[in-house]
């Protein structure tokens, strides 16, 4: 597996499935947000891309703008969501939207 080169991205190995378990619980408690449509193995989520707003606050887990996988199959949709979010944020910051 190749590491993600972008310094803003976080990629790690969740040996004891702590993050996967927390994300699964969060998804169950927040059915109105995007939900992963795949990638369960032995009861745990794996190989998913999750995109949060750049202004997200982590006191409580913020809603995802995008959440799906496996990563190799959802890159196009992830990129589209990222570009749409970036364009919207840029417009708000410059007062054009």
Image (cartoon, grey):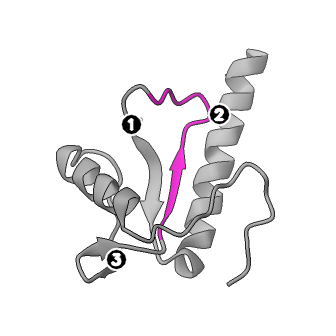
Task: Between label 1 and label 3, give the one nearer the viewer.
Answer: 1
Q: Spatial distance from mark 1 to mark 3, Cα to Cα?
A: 21 Å
Q: Nearer the viewer, residue 80 or 14?
A: 14
Q: Which residues are magenta?
A: 48-58
Give the answer, above or below, for where 30 lies relative to 94: below
Provide residue 16's location: percent of width, then percent of height: 37, 68
Q: Secondary structure at mark 2?
A: helix
Q: Earlier in the sequence, mark 1 or mark 2?
A: 1
Magenta: predominant secondary structure element? Answer: loop
**Residue 46 lies within the magenta run:** no
Cβ atoms at labels 1 and 2 below 8 Å apart = no
Position of residue 91 in the picture relative to residue 66 (left or right) = right
Query: For mark 2, what is the residue?
Result: 88
Q: Which mark is residue 38?
A: 3
Q: Secondary structure at mark 1?
A: loop
At x 69% / y 40%, what residue is drawn? 86
Q: Which mark is residue 61?
A: 1
Cβ atoms at labels 1 and 3 below 8 Å apart = no
């Amino acid at each position: 597996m190749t590491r993600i080169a972008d310094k803003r991205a976080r990629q790690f190995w969740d040996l004891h499935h702590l993050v996967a378990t927390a994300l699964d619980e969060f998804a169950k408690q927040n059915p109105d947000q995007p939900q992963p449509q795949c990638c369960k193995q032995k009861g745990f989520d794996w190989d998913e891309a999750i995109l949060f707003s750049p202004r997200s606050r982590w006191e409580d887990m913020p809603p995802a703008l995008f959440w799906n996988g496996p990563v190799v199959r959802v890159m196009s949709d992830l990129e589209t969501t990222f570009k749409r979010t970036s364009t919207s944020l840029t417009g708000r910051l410059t007062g054009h939207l």
